[in-house]
């Protein structure tokens, strides 16, 4: 219980800036480590197998994102409920929420694995695999699918661990898996000569180790601030319904990103070809990597916002959002400068194919055009999710990809060719940022009317 009290005291009383840093730094490290699964695979595959193999991994990526989306559906919804329950000092309810999340994501993992194995070939063709790319995509997916049994549990449970305020162990879990993946990749690809299958096998083994630690965290090592008993695993419809509702925004965002990649890949089949698909695969991995620090800030802010919103401390809620927005703007500006100045050098880390590097420079610059402001939009969706308002969170999660970006990608290339695909990104970003500003302004006006004075204390 000492650990419970320590984490709760920090969420309730520690100054916002130091608290955000305390939670965000290990959270960001963990998220960056998670994104390195695909980064490391792509780099080693590009160097050891070739450009078409990079494209093959890019075709499989939307499937992995759908798996991730379902994990976030459970994990982030549960995280919001756990944090708010702790804010209300309702530890029993927090434990029941965590137990229900464990049960739900375990069942989902098994179902997903079976479905992917049954529909593997048609899925790959639907997601944009050409005849040249298909063999590589199939080899990669046929191995990495085994990890879909336990990887969703790892992702989902990591969110619950962060919701307790324990960002350190969340980081350890992801670092453990990533470091192992980095070690195993060159062994399986180069030493054992397993090629793209070796990269997939290295990832599956690494994910299993992370999954094992997550299980041990709750049931063997007993490091959690929650005590999960067998009766907490009993499904409760009300908890599952609220969990799914709150996590739906993140689910839609991830699925829409997956749908976006599918549409981009299929559009590039028409307007660009195999090399363009490979270039898009590299750009997406770069983008996913540089957005992880932004998501780290959001993930750190969510338990702060949810806890203090549950405790009716609106001053700390508003200050948490303000400092989070400023932090993401600074991080976004840093990456913006680097990628605008040296895009070819960054792309070249993935492949020495001059055609791929040349084709990817302009798209990369377009995709990051408004990157310093992207964090504001992400924080907006996370804010509404944290306070239990699913509808505006869903709207913000849908706005960029579904409402703006996908329609633009479908229609602009008809007039502008492949250039129209890439110009769609900054236009969609600007429109989504505008909607976020409007919804946040309205919500903050409502919070101001509550006229609740904040309580600031140093930890």
Image: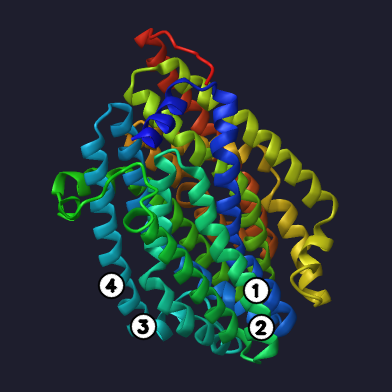
For the point 34% across and 54% down, the residue is 218
Contact (Cβ within 8 Å) of mark 2 with mark 1: yes
The residue positioned 42% from the left and 25% from the top of the image is 9
Residue 183 disc label: 1
Label 4 and label 1: CA atoms lie apart by 30 Å
Q: Is residue 252 above or below residue 258?
A: above
Mark 3 closeness class: few <14, some 14–19, many ≥20 residues within 10 Å: some
Which residue is label 4 attached to? 111
Figure label count: 4
Location of residue 143 in the rendering, given as x and y in whole percent from the top left corner = 47, 83
In-front residue for pair 212/83: 212
Looking at the rendered structure, the secondary structure element under dot 2 is helix
Q: Nearer the viewer, residue 232 or 39?
A: 232
Q: CA distance from mark 3 to mark 4?
A: 10 Å
Disc nearer the start of the sequence (3/2)? 3
Question: Which comes sooner in the sequence, label 3 or label 4?
Answer: 4
Q: Disc 2 designates what residue?
A: 187
Left or right of residue 25: residue 67: left
- The crowd level at tag 2 (other Cα within 10 Å; few <14, some 14-19, many 20+) is some
Q: Is residue 428 visible?
A: no
Query: Which of the marked residues, 4 or 1, is nearer the chain's N terminus?
Result: 4
Disc 1 packing (10 Å; few <14; some 14–19; many ≥20): few
Q: Is residue 241 visible?
A: yes
Name the mark nearer the viewer: 4 or 2: 2
SS category of the residue bearing label 4? helix
- Single out the mark in the foreground, 4 or 1: 1
The numbered mark at residue 117 is 3
Q: Residue, x 64% and y 32% (percent of image)? A: 327
**Whole-percent x and y of residue 12?**
42, 23
Residue at (58%, 64%) from the top-left corner? 178
């Amino acid at each position: 219980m000492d650990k419970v009290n320590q984490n709760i005291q920090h969420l309730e009383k520690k100054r916002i800036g130091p608290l955000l840093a305390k939670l965000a730094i290990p959270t960001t490290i963990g998220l960056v480590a998670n994104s390195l699964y695909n980064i490391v695979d792509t780099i080693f595959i590009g160097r050891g197998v070739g450009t078409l193999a990079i494209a093959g991994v890019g075709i499989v990526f939307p499937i992995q994102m759908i798996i991730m989306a379902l994990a976030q559906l459970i994990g982030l919804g549960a995280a919001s409920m756990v944090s708010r329950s702790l804010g209300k000092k309702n530890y029993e309810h927090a434990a029941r929420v965590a137990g229900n999340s464990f049960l739900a994501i375990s069942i989902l993992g098994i179902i997903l694995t079976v479905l992917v194995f049954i529909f593997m070939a048609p899925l790959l063709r639907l997601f944009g695999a050409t005849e040249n790319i298909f063999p590589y995509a199939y080899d990669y997916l046929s191995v990495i699918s085994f990890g879909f049994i336990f990887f969703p549990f790892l992702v989902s449970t990591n969110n619950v661990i962060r919701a307790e305020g324990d960002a350190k162990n969340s980081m350890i879990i992801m670092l453990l898996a990533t470091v192992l993946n980095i070690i195993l990749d060159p062994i399986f690809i180069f030493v054992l000569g397993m090629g793209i299958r070796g990269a997939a096998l290295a990832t599956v083994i690494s994910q299993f180790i992370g999954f094992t630690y997550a299980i041990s965290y709750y049931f063997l090592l007993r490091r959690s601030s929650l005590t999960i008993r067998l009766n907490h695993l009993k499904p409760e419809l009300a908890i599952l319904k609220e969990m799914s509702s709150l996590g739906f925004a993140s689910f839609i965002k991830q699925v829409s990103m997956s749908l976006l990649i599918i549409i981009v890949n299929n559009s590039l089949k028409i307007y660009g070809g195999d090399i363009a698909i490979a270039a898009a695969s590299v750009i997406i991995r770069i983008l996913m990597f540089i957005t992880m620090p932004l998501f780290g800030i959001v993930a750190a802010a969510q338990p702060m916002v949810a806890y203090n919103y549950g405790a009716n401390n609106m001053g700390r809620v508003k200050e948490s959002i303000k400092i989070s927005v400023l932090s993401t703007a600074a991080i976004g500006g840093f990456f913006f400068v680097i990628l605008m100045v040296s895009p070819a050098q960054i792309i070249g880390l993935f492949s020495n194919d001059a055609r791929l590097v040349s084709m990817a420079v302009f798209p990369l610059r377009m995709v990051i055009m408004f990157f310093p402001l992207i964090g504001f939009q992400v924080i907006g969706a996370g804010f509404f999710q944290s306070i239990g308002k699913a509808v505006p969170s869903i709207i913000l999660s849908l706005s960029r990809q579904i409402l703006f970006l996908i329609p633009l990608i479908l229609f602009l290339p008809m007039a502008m060719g492949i250039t129209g695909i890439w110009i769609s990104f900054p236009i969609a970003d600007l429109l989504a940022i505008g909607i976020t500003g409007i919804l946040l302004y309205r919500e903050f006006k409502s919070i101001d009317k509550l006229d609740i004075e904040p309580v600031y204390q140093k930890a």
